Image (cartoon, rainbow, N blue to C red):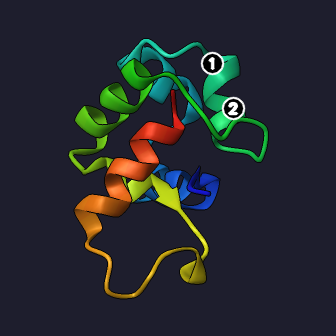
Amino acid sequence: MARLSPKKLNELKEVNLLTKEEISKLTGIPLFTVENLLSERNHHPAMWMLVALMELFSCDMKDFFEYEEDEFDSNESFSSRFTDIIASLF
């Protein structure tokens, strides 16, 4: 199953030289939730949070997720995987 990757979010945070507090202020995501997203405590954020993070970091939603390599057939397209990821959020 796809899940939000705290490691990837932390990398984006560091590359963009942002603090947790700045991410919270710039996205409208409560600080407590930002802290959970950057740790191992929250793997399924609300869609509006993902959109806010995509806008802040100027990246795609796929940049936030990780999944086990053998979870998908190697011939399966990314769009199919992405659809599965989005569906798992609801």
Q: Residue placed farthest to the bottom in the image?
A: 74
Residue 51 percent coordinates (x, y):
31, 29
Quick check: 68 left or right of 12? right
Asked whether residue 48 is in view, the answer is yes
What residue is disc 2 on? Answer: 35
- Proximity of marks 2 and 1: CB atoms separated by less than 8 Å: yes
Amino acid type indicated by mark 1: Leu
Would residue 16 be seen by someone viewing this image from the given angle?
Answer: no
Q: Which residue is denoted by mark 1 in the rendering? A: 31
What's the mark number on residue 50?
none
The secondary element bearing badge 2 is classed as: helix
Quarter of the image that includes the N terminus: bottom right
Tell me which residue sits at (33%, 49%) in the image. 83
Question: Residue 72's spot in the image, x, y percent?
Answer: 49, 75
- Residue 74 percent coordinates (x, y): 39, 87
Q: Amino acid at mark 2?
A: Glu
Task: Name the residue located 51 percent from the left edge and 51 percent from the top edge.
Answer: 9
Q: Is residue 63 above or below residue 88?
A: below
Residue 23 rendering spot, x and y as whole percentages: 46, 29
